[in-house]
Amino acid sequence: QVQLVESGGGLVQAGGSLRLSCAASESIFSLNTMNWYRQAPGKQRELVASITRGGRANVADSVKGRFTISRDNAKNSVYLQMNSLKPEDTGVYYCNTQSVLTLAEFWGQGTQVTVSS
């Protein structure tokens, strides 16, 4: 059972920055694409950014140019750098991935991001 632990959320004013971290309990080489999702109050969970095992990154159009996803294989960690934050970025941010071997899906507990106007 892989554990994913997110950290770095908080309250920030619009225009500010936050860096989210997701630490995996085992080598991320054994895991598939690493994803960041978010869920705003009353809305469905949406994919924000992904990074493949080979390091290819993608971000949603709504955050393009403001958010960057990266990974540190040595630390079994994935990061989401969020700049120029907007109130609509408010939500709970979740780390997600799958096992390469079993395809079992794993989620972190989430970290709250609140952007005030």
Image (tube, helix red, strand yellow):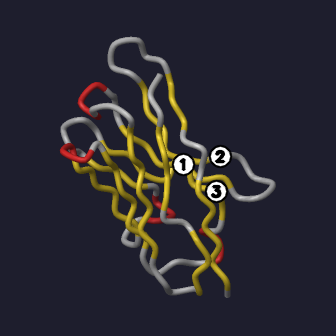
Q: Earlier in the sequence, mark 3 or mark 1?
A: 1
Quadrant for the C terminus in the image? bottom right
Q: Which three-letter amino acid code belongs to the residue tagged 1?
A: Tyr
Q: Position of residue 30 (x, y in %)?
A: 28, 25
Mark pair 3, 1: CA separation? 8 Å
Is there a contact, CB below 8 Å, between mark 2 and mark 3? no
Q: Position of residue 13 (x, y in %)?
A: 59, 87
* Residue that mark 1 sits on: 37
Mark pair 1, 2: CA separation? 6 Å
Question: Would you call the spot at circle 3 few (<14 residues within 10 Å), some (14-19), or many (20 or more)?
Answer: some
* Residue that mark 3 sits on: 92
Q: Tell me which residue sits at (23%, 45%) in the image.
A: 56
Q: Is residue 11 above or below residue 14?
A: above
Q: Which three-letter amino acid code belongs to the residue tagged 2?
A: Arg
Q: Position of residue 31 (x, y in %)?
A: 33, 28
Which structural element holds mark 1?
strand
Q: Is residue 91 above or below residue 29?
A: below
Q: Tell me which residue sits at (77%, 58%) in the image.
A: 41
Name the disc covering residue 14, or none. Answer: none
Q: Is residue 98 above or below residue 102?
A: below
Left or right of residue 62, residue 44 in this image: right
Q: Nearer the viewer, residue 108 or 35?
A: 108
Q: Tell me which residue sits at (38%, 67%) in the image.
A: 81
Q: Earlier in the sequence, mark 1 or mark 2?
A: 1
Name the disc covering residue 45, or none. Answer: 2
Is there a contact, CB below 8 Å, between mark 1 and mark 2? yes
